[in-house]
Image: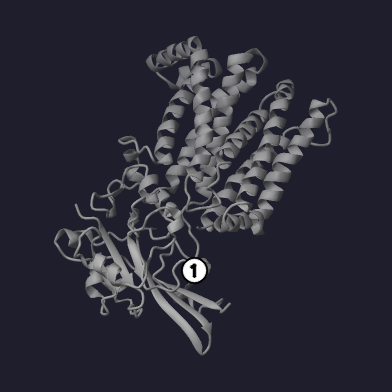
């Protein structure tokens, strides 16, 4: 049985958001709903600035808090490590949204909890998730963490560094950020600014 | 240190800029659950020890328990976004999910409270029952009431255990979520349990006669003092925790939430009623204070406590 994981090489990401668009299209997400999000981090004093884009999505944790709190078993972990939601079993109690340490779940307008599924329907057909396929810089890799020649394992092995976000939660995420400078730094504690809100006053 | 800018694109509206998952509905659900748990514990202890001294308290607990818990469950259902799937709670048991435990405990508690309620009906509303119900169901209710009275002691033990379970559950539901450091404290479940006892007693005091109230005062003062101590432990453990816990402590003790906790729960909800009741216990009552004011303040303090902690939790993050 494979153990699926994903890696994102932060040094390759150009912040084009093509993955977010591909995800929305592939999974037919309604307006205002996202399974992926982008954190843009800039530091320094002009003109000496440094920055990076960090794509975030469900981390498909090995010890997923969302699975543990679900009262109906609607959220469960498949044998291959993918965490999924059965919309028919979900009662919309929002315990999983509250329990996710990464804030990667939301309530779909139809009432159930929703999040990235690693495009399970595509994986079942032997394809990679839409975000991986569409990435123009090949920053993303997906595959079996235990497969000796799998793209994700090779990407992690080739990277100078690999990190998971908030390892102290004990959730054991299965999404790895490669060559990142700002993962788990003080930037995580900054209150994020929503780009779409810029210019409406206050920022 | 260099200035840092962080921008977020693709944020879902219910997650950023503020998590809006659980709000006042859940706070009221936890408050009513705690209040009913308090009534269940008090009435059971009274029933098992000296029922003849608190006849009105028993009547209030029996008649109000089931409707109040139903109201609390209504608040929970009101918060669900897939209400039609709620039956899914009762075709499974998820051992790692406090909400699954709670769903089953609340169902059993509701059944037991309904028994107490039904047992009271023939004595409390004999005409009402005969007028509104056919003879068959009314006879069944009367026989059920007889069965409850015959097994009152055994049922009281079950009610006591369920009361402790429901009271603890209202805190465990929050405290077992590590992603919300303002909730993730071992002190929260005992705090909600004791607060439930205090608010359950306060609710009964709105209806019981003065002599019964006076007999309840020592328990009431003790509950207030223990709740005060647990609240202090709760805040201090956050202050002594890691960076995330300390941030949560700041949320709990500053701004609107801090003022609400300090003024609404600590001062008006605990210290003022405890002081007034201490004078009552010393047989030197403060006559300028209406008799129903201290219990009302305690109830309000209990609501504020749940609201403050629920809202602090969803603002806090690891």
Colour logic: one colour
Q: Say which element carries label 1.
A: loop
Question: Picture coordinates of residue B281 (x, y %)?
Answer: 79, 26
Pick out the residue farthest to the right. B284
Picture layout, residue B308 above or below residue B298: below
- Dot 1: few (<14), some (14–19), or many (≥20) neighbours within 10 Å? few
At x 73%, y 36%, the residue is B294
Image quadrant containing the N terminus of chain B: bottom right
Residue B47, quarter of the rendered image: top right
Q: Is residue B81 visible?
A: no
Picture layout, residue A183 above or below residue B204: below
| Depth order, front residue of B266/B182 | B182
At x 40%, y 14%, the residue is B140
Identify the residue under disc 1: A185
At x 48%, y 51%, the residue is B22
Picture layout, residue B248 above or below residue A48: above
Q: Is residue B175 visible?
A: yes
| Depth order, front residue of A79/B254 | A79
Chain of the residue that carries numbered disc 1 in the rendered image: A
């Amino acid at each position: 049985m494979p153990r699926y994981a994903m890696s994102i090489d932060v040094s390759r990401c150009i912040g084009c958001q093509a993955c977010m668009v591909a995800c929305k299209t592939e999974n037919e997400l309604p307006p205002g709903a996202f399974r992926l999000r982008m954190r843009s981090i800039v530091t320094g004093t002009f003109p000496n600035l440094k920055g990076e884009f960090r794509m975030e999505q469900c981390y498909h944790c090995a010890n997923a808090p969302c699975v543990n709190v679900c009262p109906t078993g609607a959220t469960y972990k498949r044998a291959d490590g993918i965490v999924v939601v059965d919309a028919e079993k979900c009662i919309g109690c929002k315990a999983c949204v509250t329990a996710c340490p990464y804030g990667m779940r939301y309530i779909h307008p139809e009432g159930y909890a929703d999040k990235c599924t690693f495009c399970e329907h595509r994986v079942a057909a032997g394809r990679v998730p839409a975000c991986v396929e569409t990435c123009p810089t090949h920053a993303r890799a997906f595959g079996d963490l235990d497969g000796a020649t799998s793209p994700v394992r090779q990407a992690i092995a080739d990277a100078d560094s690999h990190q998971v976000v908030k390892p102290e939660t004990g959730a054991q995420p299965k999404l790895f950020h490669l060559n990142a400078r700002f993962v788990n730094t003080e930037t995580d504690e900054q209150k994020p600014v929503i780009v779409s809100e810029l210019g409406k006053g206050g920022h | 240190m260099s200035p840092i800018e962080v921008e977020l694109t693709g944020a879902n509206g219910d997650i950023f800029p503020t998590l809006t998952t659980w709000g006042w509905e859940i706070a009221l659900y936890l408050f009513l659950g705690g209040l009913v748990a308090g009534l269940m514990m008090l009435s059971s202890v009274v029933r098992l020890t000296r029922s003849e001294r608190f006849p009105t308290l028993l009547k209030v607990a029996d008649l109000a328990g089931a409707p109040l818990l139903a109201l609390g469950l209504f608040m929970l259902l009101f918060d669900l976004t897939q209400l039609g799937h709620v039956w899914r709670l009762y075709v499974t048991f998820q051992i790692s999910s406090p909400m699954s435990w709670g769903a089953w405990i609340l169902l059993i508690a509701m059944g037991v409270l309904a028994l107490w309620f039904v047992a009271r009906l023939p004595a409390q509303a004999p005409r009402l029952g005969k007028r509104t119900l056919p003879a068959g169901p009314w006879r069944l209710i009367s026989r059920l009431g007889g069965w409850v009275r015959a097994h009152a002691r055994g049922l009281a033990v079950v009610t006591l255990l369920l009361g402790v379970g429901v009271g603890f559950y209202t805190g465990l539901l929050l405290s077992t979520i590590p992603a919300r450091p303002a909730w993730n404290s071992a002190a929260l479940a005992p705090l909600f349990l004791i607060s439930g006892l205090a608010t359950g007693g306060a609710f009964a005091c709105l209806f019981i006669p003065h002599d019964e109230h006076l007999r309840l005062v020592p328990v009431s003062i003790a509950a207030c003092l223990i709740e005060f101590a647990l609240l202090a432990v709760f805040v201090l453990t956050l202050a002594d925790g890691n960076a995330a816990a300390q941030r949560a402590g700041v949320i709990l003790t500053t701004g609107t939430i801090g003022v609400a906790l300090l003024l609404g729960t600590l001062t008006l909800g605990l210290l003022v009623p405890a002081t007034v009741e201490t004078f009552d216990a010393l047989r030197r009552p403060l006559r300028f204070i209406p008799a129903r004011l201290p219990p009302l303040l305690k109830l309000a303090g209990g609501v504020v406590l749940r609201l403050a902690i629920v809202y602090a939790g969803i603002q806090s993050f690891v």
